[in-house]
Amino acid sequence: MKLRFMGAGFILGGRPCPVYPVLQDDTGRVVEIVADYFAFRALRRGASSGTLRNEAYVLLDWWRMLERGGYFWDEATDSELERWAGRCDDRGLTLARSVRRVGVVHAFYVAVRRHFGAPERLVQLEADVQSGTPRQLSSQLRRSGRRGGKLALGPAYRPRTVAKRPGRPTPEPDEVQRVLDALLEGPHRSDYVGIRDCLLAGWMEQCGLRREGAVGVGPGALALALAAEGVRDDDGPYDLVAGTDAAHIQDAVFAGLRRLRQMRRSHVFVSVTEKRRKTRSVPVPLGFLEINLQFLWEPWTEAVAARRASRPGYAPPDRLFLSLKTGRALLPGSAGDIVKDAFSSAGVDGSGHRLRAAFALRVVKTAYLEQRARHWRFWDPAAVLLYAAEVLGHENMETLRPYLNAIVREGIRLQGEPILIQDHQAAAVFRSLANAVNQGRDGVLDSLASVLRGHGLVPEPELDTLERLAEVLGVAG
């Protein structure tokens, strides 16, 4: 196959068409269907000489591929187009250029079907050539202002992506505990390292941080988070590092945390910086915050003092997790390696990002149960995903939908309906009562009914639209 281009004085249908392309086979015979198509493009669609030239090179390449495969042009389907597009990608063409080339071939087959009577079974792009997703007819505004049905092409071709490895499952709670135990009790040079590594993983599992965010946590960020909740000095945030030698600072901070609990607060919000240097606020449980403060005021302080003994001018960075070897903050890569080794030691498949996945699953499940408890069957999936995406720092909440789908499937297999108890002590009482009722303990349910009557309360049934409708219509149960 070869291309010839007519001279500058070439006239077609009374219109000057310089550099007009002509596709010929090896015998010199003109490929008539392509000639008809180029005449249609030039005379009916007003395509410029440069556009025709570019399209001619694409169709030449397409024809050569068909010739090598032993196909005639009117035997090609989407399968051949996909293979050709893959070869374009293998040759190092950019994605944008591959998309344009696929579009040229597709436009050729659309035109020859509509205007030259080619068979309908040819290249159609009724499905995306990469994913198989059906394509839709959409109403698009033409230049004349009239609307008409036109195939919405979109990205007709995307290179296939092959997963490097199958997705790793989200670790179960007992597996997470084994990983944390491996970090705390591993063969360390000092107790500081074991506690440091366990807390580092804790920020991933308790707060959903990526490794960049975990190694970036420091005393300054904790002080600002406490100050935002009113746990502060008259002059501003407490100097938590100075609190290692000042008992009154420690007492004031712990008193402030007790006050927050009395106000039914369960978290403070700590500012962290993660990938692409984006900063976000993450909820940190008060109990976990207390552990970090205790770490700061004991093992961290002892490690800093030991380093200053050998290096008097040492000034630690504003970070919780320091390297004993360098005295500097742990690097994200080092943090990832530490946690990955703990997964291996515990016999659990995964890495630090799986700890974040465990947190994500827990956040989505909590939000789902709260939605169900508040709104019964009228819960809002978008509200669940939006809340979880905000907590996890996801730009696209749809990335969390697999977690929600799994939780809903699990809920379908179980009988019952969640209720919301916001007080932790009360929740423990109700959990014991629920377990007793589910076990069929005699008299527990009757006793609960008596308590309700004694306080002038009645059982509040689940809101069931069909039951209400039956009641309104007078349908017997």
Image: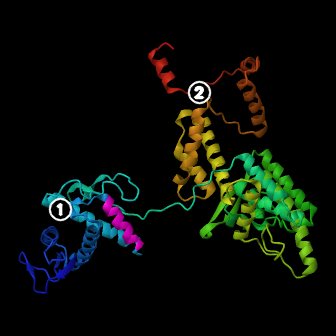
Answer whether residue 457 is magenta in the image.
no
Identify the magenta region: 79-90
Residue at the extreme top: 476
Q: In this view, does 145 lie to the left or right of 382?
A: left
Residue 217, percent across and down? 74, 65
* Above-or-below relation of 474 to 465: above
Residue under pointer 2: 462
Label ID, residue 179? none
Quarter residue 50 falls in: bottom left
- Asked whether the viewer can see residue 233, the reply is no
Decide: few, some or many residues near mark 2? Use Cα within 10 Å; few <14, some 14-19, many ≥20.
Answer: few
Quarter residue 454 falls in: top right
Q: Distance between the residues labelled 1 and 2?
A: 62 Å
Residue under pointer 1: 112
Q: Is residue 118 left or right of residue 332?
A: left
Residue at screen point 10% across, 83% down:
10
Residue type highlighted by circle 1: Val
Residue at screen point 79% across, 65% down:
237
Q: Main secondary structure of the magenta part?
A: helix
Give the colour scheme shown.
Answer: rainbow
Residue type highlighted by circle 2: Glu
